[in-house]
Image (cartoon, grey):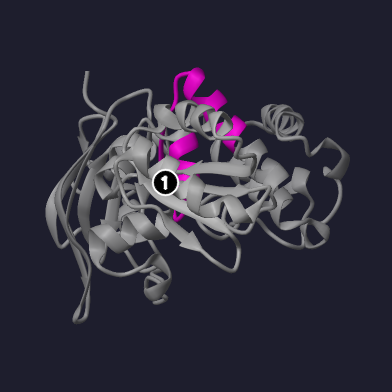
Amino acid sequence: MHPAVEADSLVKTFGEQRAVDGVSLTVPTGSVYGVLGPNGAGKTTTIRMLATLLRPDAGSARIFGYDVVREPTAVRSLVGVTGQYASVDEDMTATENLVIFSRLLGLSRTDAKRKSNELLEEFDLVEAANKPLKNFSGGMRRRLDLAASLIAAPPLLFLDEPTTGLDPRTRAQMWETIRRLVREGSTVLLTTQYLDEADQLADRIAVIDRGRVIADGTADELKASVGVSTLQLTLVDRTQTEAARQVIATQLGTEVAITPEAGRLSAPMSNTSITPEILIRLRDNDIAVDEITVSKPSLDEVFLTLTGHSAEDDAETERSVA
């Protein structure tokens, strides 16, 4: 069985800008593969090449064994694409949009109406089915856009930052929809700026920056590669801060920092399973804990370590290509 995606040293330039600089990816069938990176990293350009919307300047790519350059028609029959911006018509209703997309894909009037109704129910849009999209929230538009990309039930779905700008409830709904699609046999290639999204959804993640893949692995492997977890703790009685620092330092065998203003103690942890032992030792010393957290590296910490700059430092967005 061919992998869903095989990309080898893909390159795309726009003038003097090298948007994609030798990207290689292998996406197993039946998985969620995350492509994680800041704006301008080359994620969208990579998706466009894999979906036959852009011709690579160098390198090669195959979708289920079909070459994206030599066999674009076969590739397009196997993929669905949901871009960063909704492709639906603002002046039409949700039903009208889905019916038109269905008809363009070759469905009869009866089948188009049936498919539209099924998707509206699946994406919780039945009550808004006859409302114009100009009255939709951002989350409703994204759900409708995803519904439209599933009309043909493609075995491979490209989702380009599908939850950017969504509220937490709608974002969670999108996550569950993606999980369901994979359970039912689809393969998903997901681009995102959010480490937590990749962590929740992706079986494997490629970190891409300035057109290159700079790391590849599971979410836990990526987090472990950039540093250890951090213990943060505050006390009920701040006069016990120094005593608590000594207890924690003894347990962890490392320096413990104190933030005087907040009375917070923090220290790196290579083994988070020792946290209960720390709490026991503090209790044995009659030191009451008000709050304790153990956090893994954030998205910005991942990028700062891997690239030397934070995700926010690179505000330049990828050039839009029609």
- Crowdedness of circle 1 by 10 Å Cα count: few (<14), some, many (20+)? some
Residue 29 sits in quarter: top left
Viewer-nearest residue: 303 or 322: 303
Q: Residue at x 70, y 57 (%)?
A: 138
Is the residue 267 above or below the residue 112 in the image? below
- Residue 4: give x, y in percent of width and height: 29, 30
Q: Is residue 158 visible?
A: no
Is the residue 217 above or below the residue 47 in the image? above
Query: Left or right: where does residue 234 sit relative to residue 52?
Result: right
- Residue 270: give x, y in percent of width and height: 31, 38
Viewer-nearest residue: 128 or 266: 266
Q: Is residue 122 visible?
A: yes
Task: Quarter of the image for the C terminus: give it.
Answer: bottom left
Residue 315 sits in quarter: bottom left
Magenta includes 178? yes
Viewer-nearest residue: 166 or 156: 166
Q: Residue at x 40, y 33 (%)?
A: 272
Q: Amino acid at mark 1?
A: Gln
Is the residue 186 above or below the residue 292 in the image? above
Which residues make up the magenta segment?
175-200
Task: Quarter of the image for the N terminus: give it.
Answer: top left
- Residue 149: give x, y in percent of width and height: 54, 41
Query: Left or right: where does residue 118 sit relative to residue 71?
Result: right
Residue 70 sits in quarter: top left
Look at mark 1 in the image and give the residue it sits on.
246
Q: Residue at x 37, y 35 (%)?
A: 251
